[in-house]
Image: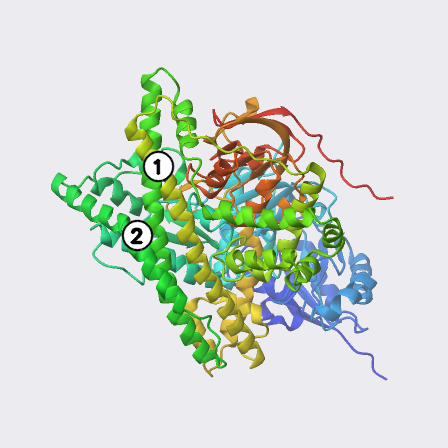
Amino acid sequence: MQQPRSELVELSDVIDARYGGKALGLAELAAAGFPVPAAFVIANAAAGVLPVELEARYARMAASAETGAVAVRSSAAGEDGLESSFAGQYETVLGVHGYDELLAAIRHCAAGASAERAAAYRPGAGISGAMHLVVQEMVDARAAGVVFTADPAGGRRDLCVVDAVPGLGESLVDGSASSDHYEVDRAGQIMDRRIASSPALTDDEVMAVVAGARAAEARWGMPLDLEWAIDRTGEIRWLQARPITTLPGDLNEMDSTVAGEDHVYTRCNIGEMMPGAFCPLTASVSGQAIEYAMQMVQVAGGFQDSYHEDRWLQLGYFSGHLFLNMTEGTALSSGILGNSLEQYSLSIAGRVVDELVPKPPKPLARRLVNTVRLTTFALSAGRAIRRLDRELARFEAPSAAEPAALLAELDAGIELYNEATLTHVRSSSRSAVAANVLEQTVMREAIRAGRSEDEGRSRAAAMMAGAADVESAVMLEHLDDVVGRLAGDPAAAEAFLERDAAEAVTGLTGGTGPISRTFNEFLRRHGHRGYRELCMRDRSWRDDPDGLGTIMQAMLRARLSAGDTVRPTPASPQKGVSRTVRMMARLARAGARGREATKSRMVQVAYLLSRGYGLLGERLAATGRLPDADLVFFFARSELPALAGTGDVQDLVDRASGRRAALPFQARLEFPDVSVGKPVPARLEPPEGSEDGVIVGRPACSGVVEGIVRVATTVAQARELHPGEVLVAPVTDVGWTPYFTLIAALVTDIGSSVSHGAVVAREYGLPCVVNTQGATRVLRTGDRVRVDGDRGTVTLLDRAPVPSPPTTA
């Protein structure tokens, strides 16, 4: 019986992936003119009989090789393909000298096809098992490494990642050497570098590697992972090219168009209402509702002719995050009386934004007319609220049985959502203006009296405390009442704490006793609230018994350990305050109350729409249009009619799946507080002054307290809070509010005097410092700090020990 034979294939004859992705990658690089070391392929190397021409072909290669040596690398069918890389699963032999060594290397690599690790990897990776080998000239490398045209760890396609070592790159691949590390953006800027004392590459060489990799990426039309070496003459030689198979969907696929390259965008303000990264449906429903409302304010004030439905002007959606366009907002400061660019900056970002260029001021007459129009629009919010209440009473949650009919109901609900959001923005603008004017006035008075600006800010913050019936504070009082009733019934408290959090809430909901009735009344009034409550995908308290139950159990444990505590009633300082200032303080308190009330109405509509879109996902999954109901949240609203139709939507579904995979990567991104042009993620530096142990922010509620820090960048991390700790968070929204019953003070990265955390902290008498620009990056859980809500400072007193890494036996 004739033995099977292998075949020798020249690299120039490789035109598809039949000989493996590694062979194809090299062939395509060579065909495109990239400097590739000479190579050929041994097809079916494990077949038994090697090609008769192998010895002569090897001799020619060895004779022309720089080092006289070759490398033998696997190129199994399916390896380094679009679906999987199979990296490191097969064998490579370097530095092969002589034909006998070549034969031994071929046998060794061919046997790798049946190696235990490769066999275990293969079933789920689509690898056929056919083993081909690439025999390639060795490069006399001065430096070598890998380059990724997208960040394989962070998912960002705007970064090239270069890792380099001196000499051969195999020490990098096998992990035996630490590499120099570079991250380079598309503008050619090195954004991050971690290098040894004697770097393997110059910056020019890093840029040359990146340029070559980007050129290869452009030819392939996809992100690539390439191996390279720089020889002794300084020439880059390309050794391998393969697709990056571990990337999520493009983090920037759904980005909106930048309104202007010189426009200033910020996460401040909008980051409080919409914290974190959001699914595309949230952006095109809640984001567009905010965009509509803010454009309509511009129209009402005479700064814009009409609403532009097809353009993002006031907001931007980048890398899954929503940003406020401050440049568009400067129309207010340039077009009306009594609102300076500084005031506008302070109300949004908590600081004067030097990057913001004011628009030319309008003529005095025009500013007077605009001021009257905008003031009338803001002050008439009461009528809009009453009209909204009537429409809300008539609005029913979308529930049609057929997807197309259900989508029509949802579209009708969008109109109500837009109006609710506009009403909230009108109310918020009234609140912000009153608070800013109060703060500026009291600051000027403090300076005239020889005191500091911080003292003025602290006094203004204290004057804004004591607003009756602030919705967030009322909600917390109602929940605290439920917890108090549980604490007063030892048997009920024990049963509630012994159960799983979700079961505890479900049991309380289904009960008939007085505690259950009180709790169900809380859900009736506040059940639509929760963390990230404008997100179409995140669940409200009514629909998240586990989340709400965890909060309530933490509150109950604190109540049982500390007993009933009486929170100090914030007193608004009146001594030495002029009648005008007292009037402005009343307006600011009323504004805060109205702002919170309209926010609750807005969230009520968002909640009903969220449930409707969830139901749409269930309907589409039941009919086979979607693989699962959750995927509906990863379509833009404009894409949903295609799903409700009958045409082929597989490509659209695949893109939505990529967006879902991208969201966790987007959630980890951080941005500067302001960006000129399109916001780009960054590794943020600690705030100025923190090296001295003092973090400076803005005072939001007076008082001084010392305590142990609990850093929580998500509300899930806040579940670990212990009573009396200082909560340090990026920002807080209503979902964090129940934890305010546990904490001794609040510190946030962003925020202003009218932000959610500041308003509720004042009502609970909690010292509060906002807009620290990065306390979460400086402090760590366990640190001991002094929070001075009068001066707006956080002082590190004792540093917590760094946790030891886990050990293995």
Instruction: Identify the image quadrant of residue 466.
Output: top left
The residue under the point 54% across, 35% down is 747
Q: Percent from the top left, x then y, of residue 63?
A: 68, 55
The chosen color scheme is: rainbow
Instruction: Identify the image quadrant of residue 124.
Output: bottom right
57 on left or right of 525: right
Observer able to see residue 355: no
The residue carrying pointer 2 sits among few (fewer than 14), some (14 to 19) or many (20 or more) residues within 10 Å by Cα, namely many
Q: Percent from the top left, x then y, of residue 776?
A: 57, 37
Q: On the rendered image, what quadrant is the N terminus found in?
A: bottom right
Q: Percent from the top left, x then y, of residue 796?
A: 60, 25
The Cα atoms of the two marked residues, 1 and 2, are separated by 17 Å
- The correct choice, above or below, for 274 with respect to 629 in the image is above
- The correct choice, above or below, for 449 with respect to 104 in the image is above
The residue under the point 55% across, 63% down is 660
Observer able to see residue 793: yes
Report the residue marked by disc 2.
Answer: 381
The residue under the point 75% across, 73% down is 6
* Nearer to me, 363 or 356: 363
Residue type beneath disc 1: Arg
* Nearer to me, 699 or 643: 699
Local secondary structure at mark 2 = helix
Report the residue marked by disc 1.
Answer: 586
